[in-house]
Image (cartoon, rainbow, N blue to C red):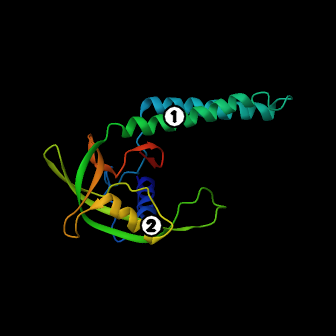
């Protein structure tokens, strides 16, 4: 349990470090935040992993190099299909709602780096706290926002497109998970990992 607690604390620190608005967890308190996935996508992903690693291992142990490389390429494609299918399957069930923006924060942050060798890039990002009602129950949540911007001006222009009203009554559209309404996304439903439609 101590390891789980340390991982959870580390995730919280990485997620909320430097932000005034902390993420309202949609997962059980104290648990490790994990991606939501379906059984079929897990099976496809596992098959892709086997197709990828098996041929690579055989290639380096056989006399004829790269004989099994096409199977590794099939593995990579299966991993991509699993990721795409999972994102589509999870988020297609989310329901669009109108929500009141009760608080927001805009700040300059370092973007996530694709690898440890990539340079650190500063971008503008934001967080929202939204108030909404779903199936007769009241919720306050921090929707997942994946958009970031090169300049503060671009971010504020995006705000004008996606958030309407005055400071005391800002409104926006979110998509909520009908099984767990605290799990919600801002503005658009993802169709690909990291992207929204």
Give the secondary structure at mark 2: helix
Please identify the quarter of the rendering in which residue 74 is found.
top right
Residue 59's disc is none
Q: Residues within 10 Å of mark 1 (few under 14, many from 20)?
A: many
Establish if 142 lies above or below 176: below
Residue most toward the left? 136
| Most foreground residue, 147 or 134 | 147
Expressed as whole percent of the image width and height from the top left, the position of residue 175 reads: 30, 47
Give the secondary structure at mark 1: helix
Establish if 104 lies above or below 41: below
Q: Residues within 10 Å of mark 2 (few under 14, many from 20)?
A: few
Q: Is residue 77 left or right of residue 186?
A: right
Which residue is at 56% across, 37% downward?
Answer: 80
Disc on the earlier residue, 1 or 2: 1
**Residue wearing tag 1:** 82
Expressed as whole percent of the image width and height from the top left, the position of residue 122 reads: 53, 69
**Residue wearing tag 2:** 154
Which residue is at 31% across, 51% downward?
Answer: 26
| Most foreground residue, 3 or 179 | 179
Please identify the quarter of the rendering in which residue 36 is found.
top left
- Distance from the alpha carbon under mark 1 to that under mark 2: 33 Å
Establish if 145 lies above or below 35: below
Q: Is residue 82 left or right of residue 24?
A: right
Please identify the quarter of the rendering in which residue 158 is found.
bottom left
Residue most toward the right? 63
């Amino acid at each position: 349990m101590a390891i789980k607690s340390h991982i959870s604390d580390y995730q919280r620190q990485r997620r909320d470090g430097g932000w005034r608005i902390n993420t309202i967890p949609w997962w059980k308190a104290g648990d490790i935040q994990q991606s939501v996935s379906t059984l079929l996508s897990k099976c496809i992903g596992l098959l892709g992993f086997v197709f990828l690693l098996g041929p690579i291992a055989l290639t380096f142990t056989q006399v004829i190099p790269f004989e099994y490389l096409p199977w590794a390429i099939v593995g990579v494609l299966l991993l991509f299909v699993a990721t795409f299918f999972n994102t589509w399957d999870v988020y297609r069930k989310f329901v669009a709602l109108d929500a009141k923006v009760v608080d927001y924060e805009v700040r300059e942050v370092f973007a996530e780096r694709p690898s440890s060798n990539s340079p650190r890039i500063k971008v503008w990002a934001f967080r929202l706290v939204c108030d909404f009602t779903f199936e007769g129950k009241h919720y306050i949540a921090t929707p997942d926002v994946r958009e970031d911007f090169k300049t503060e001006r671009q971010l504020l222009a995006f705000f004008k497109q996606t958030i309407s009203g005055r400071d005391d009554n800002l409104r926006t559209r979110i998509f909520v998970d009908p099984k767990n309404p605290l799990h919600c996304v801002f503005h658009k439903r993802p169709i690909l990992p990291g992207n929204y439609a």
